[in-house]
Each structure stands twice: as C-alpha cells, then as structure tokens.
Amino acid sequence: MPNDHAAAGLSRNERLILSLIRRHGPMPRAALSQPTGLSAQSITNLTRKLIQAGYLDAGEVVRGKVGQPSTPLALAPDGALFLGLKIGRRLAELALVDFAGRVRMHRQEVHAHPDPDRILAFARQGLATLTGSLTPAHRARIAGLGVATPYRLWDWGAEMADWLGRDLRGELARDLRYPVFLDNDATTACGAELIFGRSALPRDFIHIYVAHFAGGGIVLDGALRHGPSRNAGALGSMPIPEGGQLLDRASVSALEQRIGRSLPPDDEGWDVPEAVERAWARDAGRALAFVAMSAVALADLPLVVIDGAVPTATRARLAAATRAALADMPAAGIDRPQVIEGSMGRMARILGAAALPLSHHFQPDGALDQGVCA
C-alpha cells in the first residue's frame, strides 16, 4: 500500500524525480538526468520502479524529433490520495486530492464561527462519506490527512474560547488509520504555491495570503520555514507605521468594516462598490509594501507573492497597489522586490492542507515536512 509503508520506502532520488515532474509536467527520462545529477541508467532503473509502484505513467512515444524517440513520464493520478481539511473564519472545507494535484471530491460548510465540536463532526462525517465512496484499492492509497487552521483560534474573540486546550489533530487521529498533519492555514497557502503553483518561483520568497485576516509564509533555499515556535512568516501580526498590524489593513475583515456588512466566502457573492475597494486596496498596498520591504531588508528576498481568498480582480488590485507603494518607498542599500500574484486563490489553504501528507511522503526533503504529525 503506497501510504505509510510504501511511500516511506522511497529513496531521496525517487522523490526528487517525482517532485521535478510535479513542478515541470511530463518529462522524458533524458530530461531528468541533468537536474538530478544521475546517470541515464540510474534514471531508467528508478523510473521503472516508480512506474511499477503506480506513481508514474508512461505516455505515448514521441517521434520525429532530433535524436532517439522519447517517452514522457507523468504523475499517475491514482498513485496516492491526500485528504485536506481547512478551518476558516466562516467556512470549513474538506477535499480529496489526487497525486496530480486535482481535487476529486470536495465538501464545505458555512458557519458563523468555527465551533470545535461542529468542526469535528463535519470532518468525521465528511471523511466517512469521501472515503466510503472509494474502492478498497483507492482507500489503500490514502497517504494522510492534512489540517490547515489558524493558530491561537481562542484569540479571535470570546465565542472562540472553546478552542483553548483542544487537540484537534489528536482527536481526529484517534479515528483514522493514516497519519494526521496540522499546520497554520496561511503557511499551508504558501505551501500550496510551492508544491502546486507556478514553476518559475525563486528559492527564496515571502507569500502573503489575504483572507478574513492576513497571514503569510516564508520560503528559504526552496523550503518552507516554520521557526522554533512554528510561527515564522506570521506577517499578518507585523506592526505597521500607521498603527496596528498588517491584518488591520490588508484583510477582508478590514474591507467588511468599510462596507458595514459581511462578505460571503465565494467570488459570486462578492459585491463591493469599486470606489470602496479601490481605497481599501490602496491602504492595504501601503501596509503590504512596508511588510515586503522589511522582509527584504531582513532576509534579502527577491520576490513577494500576494494571494488571497478574494476574487482574481481584487487580488490583482492588491498586487498593483503594493507595487505602486513600493515604488514610493526609500530603498537605499537594498533592492525592491518583485511583486506577483499567487496562482491558488481560494483553493490555496485546502490544497496546502492536502500537500502536508504529500510533502511528508513524496518531496525529496519534505519541503513542507515540519508539520505536527500523528
């Protein structure tokens, strides 16, 4: 079964091959030699093993080009399956994600606030429904459950006090035969970009995720960093010159305060007067630019990725406002970072949750693999 036992037996080179194909898409064996530093014979032996184990599919032979015919190798969608649970301020989500990164099944529940008993009931019922619909062979391919949740939920207000002292990961793990991983939701959003997102990312960048509140993640030397208390990249908590923290300016919560009502957790219900959104984005951009320049001064980062649980046009507006604010900031002694939009949007946190077990079992050095695991 390619869950705990089989996946744990993969060598680093086998994981490296899988991660390269995941990042770049189908690749012939010849194209794998240079980035891995392995001989053609080693690549042939390793990919044959991965095909036999069900992790890779061999495509049709490509002929008619210079040199020998080649066979592109692609991730086998059924190679492994991953479960992701995301806990948000107003929305809980559960998804089944395949080895190619596609969401196969998805459930969600809207709530006024995430009560722990209700979240556990939603997760247990959803897991039973999702896994119960699979064949025994597919159930055997489930590699784990990842949970994306804000840390310190009890700090959100009196209605969240029941989260204090609750061990969500432990309570879920008691019912499951596969491991459970847990990480901060903004960190997993960064992980989703790192694992499933655009291929041209540098090895060092910060990722800012604008949702009900703002959060972030930091990638150094190609790996997502967590810090000694597992709170590295807590960019939403960074103080800003205007007073308060980043989350007080660059957050959906701050926009809701301007319009005097809550916004629904989907793009279809996003109805914000353009003038109000433009003013909010301008203020948010100034705060985001301050955080970006502070990160560059501290860690020499060339890139800032801005994503969020907002419509695509709103995300673009935030990125543009951040670039404009950066251009007006003093930068003696440092280089202003490039600012780009993330590619995951509202799916970032749920895909990032599913990426926790994927990383643990299949990334060469566990790019996200510092998460709490049962």
Image (cartoon, grey):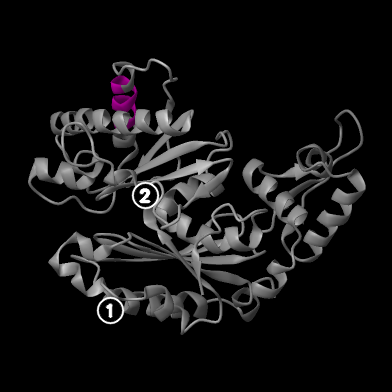
Is residue 340 visible to the viewer in this orientation of the structure? no
Image point (65%, 54%), residue name: 365
Side (left or right) of 165 relative to 1: left
Does the magenta-highlighted stretch encompass residue 60? no
Q: Residues within 10 Å of mark 2 (few under 14, many from 20)?
A: many
Exactly how many numbered labels are in the figure?
2
Q: Quadrant of residue 134?
A: bottom right
Does the magenta-highlighted stretch encompass residue 319? yes
Image point (45%, 47%), residue name: 190
Check residue 346 in the rendering and tell me which mark sits there, or answer none: 2
Residue holding disc 1: 117
Q: Is residue 35 above or below residue 53?
A: above
Amino acid type, callout 1: Asp
Measure the C-alpha gap from mark 1 to mark 2: 25 Å
Magenta residues (range): 317-325
- Kindly check if marks 1 and 2 are in contact, taking CB atoms under 8 A apart as contact: no
* Picture coordinates of residue 20, whole percent (x, y): 69, 45
Q: Residue furthest left?
A: 260
Q: Is residue 318 above or below residue 372?
A: above
* Picture coordinates of residue 88, whole percent (x, y): 30, 60
Q: Which numbered mark, 1 or 2, is in the foreground of this view? A: 1
Side (left or right) of 85 relative to 254: right
Compare marks 1 and 2 and give the one earlier in the sequence: 1
Is residue 126 visible to the viewer in this orientation of the structure? yes
Image point (49%, 45%), residue name: 193
* Picture coordinates of residue 271, whole percent (x, y): 18, 42
Q: Residues within 10 Å of mark 1 (few under 14, many from 20)?
A: few
